[in-house]
Amino acid sequence: MNIYAPVKQNLSLFEKHKATIERAIEAIHKREYYAAYPEMPSPAVYGESAEADQKKLFEAQLNSKFERLKQSHDSFLNSDEQSPFTVEKLGISYPAFADSTKYISAAQAAANDWKKTDAQTRAGILAESLDRVKASFFEIAFATMHTTGQSYMMSFQASGPHAADRAMEALALGYQELTRFPLKLIWEKPAGKVNLKLEKFITTVPKGLSLAIGCATFPTWNSVPGIYASLITGNPVIVKPHPKAIYPIAVVIAHLQDVLKENGFSPDLVMLACDTEAKPITKELAENPQIKIIDFTGSSAFGKYVESLAGKISFTEKAGVNSMIIDSVADLSAMAQNVAFSLCLYSGQMCTAPQNFFIPKAGIKVAGQQVSFEEVRDAIVAAVKGIVAHPKMGPAVLSAIQSEATQKRVEEAKKLPGKVLLESQPVPNAEFPKIRSASPIIIEISSDRKDIFQSELFGPIAFIIPTADTNESIELAASIAREHGAISCGAYTADSACMDKIAEQMAEACTPVSFNLTGNIYVNQNAGFSDFHVTGGNPSGNASLTDPEFVLKRFTRVQARVNG
Amino acid sequence: MNIYAPVKQNLSLFEKHKATIERAIEAIHKREYYAAYPEMPSPAVYGESAEADQKKLFEAQLNSKFERLKQSHDSFLNSDEQSPFTVEKLGISYPAFADSTKYISAAQAAANDWKKTDAQTRAGILAESLDRVKASFFEIAFATMHTTGQSYMMSFQASGPHAADRAMEALALGYQELTRFPLKLIWEKPAGKVNLKLEKFITTVPKGLSLAIGCATFPTWNSVPGIYASLITGNPVIVKPHPKAIYPIAVVIAHLQDVLKENGFSPDLVMLACDTEAKPITKELAENPQIKIIDFTGSSAFGKYVESLAGKISFTEKAGVNSMIIDSVADLSAMAQNVAFSLCLYSGQMCTAPQNFFIPKAGIKVAGQQVSFEEVRDAIVAAVKGIVAHPKMGPAVLSAIQSEATQKRVEEAKKLPGKVLLESQPVPNAEFPKIRSASPIIIEISSDRKDIFQSELFGPIAFIIPTADTNESIELAASIAREHGAISCGAYTADSACMDKIAEQMAEACTPVSFNLTGNIYVNQNAGFSDFHVTGGNPSGNASLTDPEFVLKRFTRVQARVNG
């Protein structure tokens, strides 16, 4: 009996990657530390000449056609990409269709075999593609750096190993859910003298064509989980990157297409569909009735539009207004250093960066001693100033500002009500004299100006807000999370009842809290395989990486029973 | 460290039921035969005097107040319930609020402790409630019989053990998902000489107030999975039964409220909110912004309305237009008997009953010999006739018609285009001379009248449709399932390539297929713990019993990290 028999089965790639996939599934279920791809750009791991070789590749790619994609296309489209470091166009063109509906029909035409192969074959091919991507981590780092403005180290880690880990996490959990129930079984029901007997078969039917809409700041990290989750569950994917950040994800797609083609599947199963700011195609694609699944990272306004589209399953990551609740600390300077770094890292352009710092106006206990609000506030401001002014650490941590819009937002922030505690300034970079940069502006604002600080002011803009007490701090942080969304929350308290209260109130707003971070762990960082990211219970989105829902919603289980 | 510590923890009830819950989880993951509650009304299992005692209870309940509920209420509401067997009102009144918003505030007020207790406590209480319900299976059977018109045996099985099994399945899978990841762990990341170390905590946050909207034909079977899925995941539930079928679910709710109260939780956590046909409250409840989850069984029109409500998570079971594809058989009479029984059982009022019988007009192979379309058609008609005419089996299988609307639909069906092969007639019942009954009408209709047979004609109405060949049969069955929904599909074929094709084409329409059923297994029957019911990929609904999605969508995971 071969009901729902897989086509183009390839178990050898699965065998090759089986141990990694199984290890990933184990790590996910223990939520323990695991890295399928080491995060340091170590020559021992990634090859002695890898960095230099790939830098050359990157440089050769500038001002030329990106010819590595195997997908169907009409012509090449000149991209809008521009380096925030050099403020120069990258000059790359990518294969494109003149008409967006052609992506739909090409991807649909490619879907049939993929839909009908098995979880092992898909998992093997997808894991192999990640290994190929690994061989391009340095090129992807340069591409990320010169599209997003991230530092080289963050570009390497976020777009390389951390993104690949998140992709592996999605594919591993997808594989586990696809194989969670037996695909074939004999069902026997006692019925007196003889048993009733049925042979049962279970298959999984993909929901259909998937659209991954990328963002400008994390072009691979935020896109690959959805791409790999859709692919492992059998859905073809059209990837529509941000017009300013195409190159990093194009490299990933090129490797995916290679491995698909080598294994007899159409490269059009995952297509790059790039556009320009002058002629966007996102809405045309999103509204096409053939698109059944949408993964989106970006603004709240566009995210709400995506969620409002009828008949689509959407996974969104929108704006988060993240809070830092400061109640009491063991060491003022350790806290100030830690939160200052979180704010400065990539100039506040991480979705997990803190914006609102709530501090009781009567001050806080520091190692049991009362310290004034002003002292706590000034410690944070001084710590930020220290990072900005540090000749080496400053440019490395703050790096560049991705968009002119963010730079403008920072400039205008000084006009906001409140008192500017620290002005934004350029962050000179010896290597890139033309860099678009802006250090954080910090504004002290009254707790009754929630109308101002409840909005996400994306970029290096922070508020220090004196509150009546920690209860008010919690109330403000939780209500903003409930009403406007939050992706992270930091809290400092030496009091266990207060810790409980913060955890509980923020949980009601479905916001994860990091307590008392000092040293080298920051509220911004979310670990693959262990930390759920954007948990789905507040307006910041529902693209929970990687809760089982993130893969389950992409397919349907169907059963057949045969009288045996 | 006690972040997210449970309140009102009660591990003793969990210990009492742990083995059953774990056995259920095992059965679910093997999809094997399992019954937590034996389906036969055996005195050895359910007690020697249970049937007689509970019949007395039922009789005493008629024409009186239902006083077993512990919920808050203003007064008692006289129900519309009427027995399809006696055509007399049941005369029962139930506690009710004058204003539907009072249910919302009472249920919300009851939610806090339940939300914050743990999965073990919830699972123990819910499993205990099912054991209490078990002690009322006979009363529930009489209540079901005299509201739905089901036979006594079906009433016992469907509303008693089968419903309790489905509830156990939902609670077991809910329990498993809630405890899938560790609630507390130490995360250590190698970082040179010392490890980075965080203590991590995971909690689950319920989505919020749940509304379960019941149907008139299966008042407990279709409602308890959603009720138990919402409760296990921490959500309070308002149960709005069909105004004509309140009594069976009221007994279930009474037991739930008892066990909740005994364990220090508010009985208002699960409330009966009944209404009358003259003054319905379903839309008022459904549209209330506090309602976050809706479980619905009923018409497609109302189901689409439920699905269209913004900001709700909905699980629906709507109309299914179910097909029977007849390609070739080993034994004509065995096939005819089986499909005739499926059509006659509860007079076609099961959501899984077949409506459209597709038979190639050139006839089919029977054990390798060609047999004409007419002969196959006549065998089915004769088998139905045989059941209807059988003095004992007829009334027992066909039983009564739940609503006047269904009876009217059957009467009017003879005016449909096509040739009436078998007329509907009353099914006399010696015990209940006034019974509302109607045997199946069978109409031969041309395959080009898809406009007629693509609609669900709920009740004992069947079409026999001669097709060009089995390809056309499949095409019609699959397109109707895709466009209008299907919950079941039966198929008979002796050809393995044809079997593959049917399975595959119907899988594209997310419809389960039962092949070559003969003897005592019927397409209508879905087994708890093994068969997914309403798989979610076609318009018949998405309340998949019990796919992990059915429980996962009812809560959000949230994490806290503490510097350690």
Image: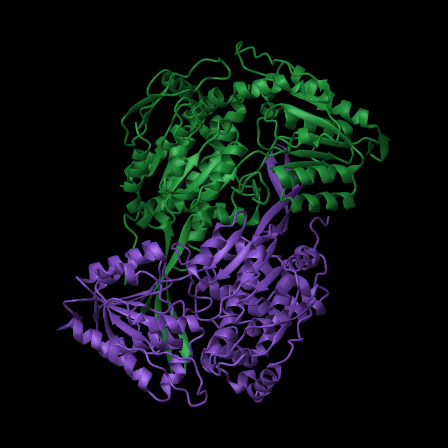
Chain colours: A green, B purple
Image x and y of residue B382, in percent: 25, 80
Identity of the residue drawn at 50% across and 83% down = B41
Where residue A319 appears, as percent x and y from the top left, is 57, 33
Left or right: B137, with B117 as reference point: left
**Front one among A556 and A19:** A556
Quarter of the image where the C terminus of chain A is located: bottom left
Across and down, in percent, residue A497 comes to: 78, 46
Near-viewer residue (B95 or B355): B95
Above-or-below relation of B331 to B222: below
Left-right relation of A205 to A298? left
When asked about the image quadrant of residue A48, the answer is top left
Q: Going by the image, does A341 lie left or right of A197?
A: right
Would you identify the image quadrant in which residue B368 lies? bottom left
Residue at the extreme right of the image, as rendered? A369
Q: Position of residue B193 (x, y in %)?
A: 63, 33
Residue in view at x 61 percent, y 27 percent: A457
Q: Is residue A77 visible?
A: yes
Asked if A46 appears above or below B296 in the picture, the reply is: above
* Residue nearer the viewer, A61 or A468: A468
